Amino acid sequence: MVEPQGPARSGLYALSRDTLRVTGADRKTWLDGLLTCAVASVTVGSAAYGLLLTKQGKIVTDAFLADSGHELWLGVAAGRGAAVRELLDRYLVMEDAELELPTAPIYWQIGATDAVTPALASGALKLGPLDTWLSVTEVAAPETADATELLAEHGLGVFGVDFDERCNPHEASLDRIAVSWTKGCYLGQEVVCMQDMRGRVKRRLVALDGSAALLDVASSASPQNDVLGPDGSVAGHVSSVHRSGGGARLLATISTSALESQAELSFLGEPLRVAFGAAPKLS
């Protein structure tokens, strides 16, 4: 598990991302056929959050997207840049588009709009219940808090920690956050649509609220991460713990049966309350 994060120090939050720069006249239409979000609708002053999937509908990476007017900036999960570039290159045939993995550091930030000027690209970004501002810059802002706590506060996980390549969008609770249901085809769309029509998954990533006592216990050396149901059976597993107000916010993958039955859940002897992600579909 990730140790509890400290309080945010400012209105600006750093996203840990690998960066791809996409140029060429066909950059938007080409990427629109690969990512789950509506790339074609991203313009200067707006941003997007989506997923790159396998043909089987599993998550390769999540991705933030910003438009400078003459290039697209693609922020993928940390450590995934080279692999994502190699994968995307396979889908470049006759399109006028080029991918570059910049050698100079590129910083991704969400939050205050007036704290990141000048920026390579920036725009308004909606992440489920979170309305914020995304900026891509070559200079790291001072005293920038890590964004994981802000994301957790709004029920959002981090790739490689709370969800990974074994998950599909519904299991990661990103089906109504990172997937456009009105755009055209994209890689893995058929599987995602079939999953949505079935209307049920075995498990989902949810945000759970608990007491402040969990902050100290969860950051100890204990590897225990089981979430228990009322009969002591394992209902799911905690992936990260964060501070939230005067208590703890936990992100955990919980069985759909436990969520649908509204079973009493506990972690390390402390009761939990579901805050985000309990429904099989988020409207």
Image (tube, grey):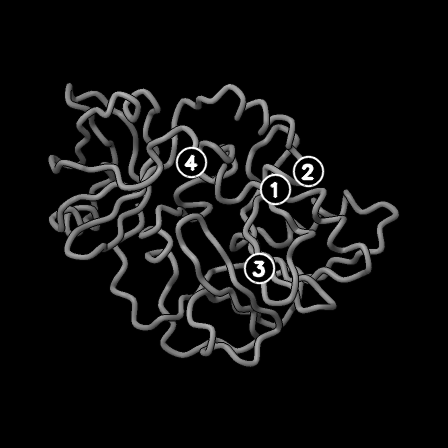
Residue at disc 2, secondary structure: loop
Q: In this view, does 59 lie to the left or right of 26?
A: left
Residue at disc 4, secondary structure: loop
Residue at disc 3, secondary structure: strand
**Amino acid at dot 3:** Ala
Is the residue marked by circle 4 packed among few (<14), some (14-19), or many (20+) residues within 10 Å? some
Q: How far apart are marks 3 and 1 (CA)?
A: 14 Å
Picture layout, residue 165 above or below residue 82: above
Q: Mark 2 points at which residue?
A: 186
Front tag of 1 and 4 = 4
Q: Does the residue at mark 3 contact the one at mark 2 (Cβ under 8 Å)?
A: no
Q: How far apart are marks 2 and 4 (CA)?
A: 21 Å
Residue 282 marker: 4
Front in this rendered view, residue 80 or 68: 68
Picture layout, residue 268 above or below residue 65: above
Front in this rendered view, residue 184 or 269: 184
Instruction: Tell me the residue at 11%/48% (across/down).
Output: 213
Give the mark, 2 or 1, whose residue is nearer the N terminus. 1
**Amino acid at dot 4:** Leu
Q: How far apart are marks 2 and 1 (CA)?
A: 6 Å
Residue 47 marker: 3
Q: Does the residue at mark 2 contact the one at mark 1 (Cβ under 8 Å)?
A: yes
Q: Distance between the residues labelled 3 and 2?
A: 18 Å
Q: Residue 34 at what x, y percent from top left?
A: 69, 43
Picture layout, residue 94 above or below residue 223: below
Residue 36 marker: 1
Residue 259 marker: none
Is the residue marked by circle 2 packed among few (<14), some (14-19), or many (20+) residues within 10 Å? many
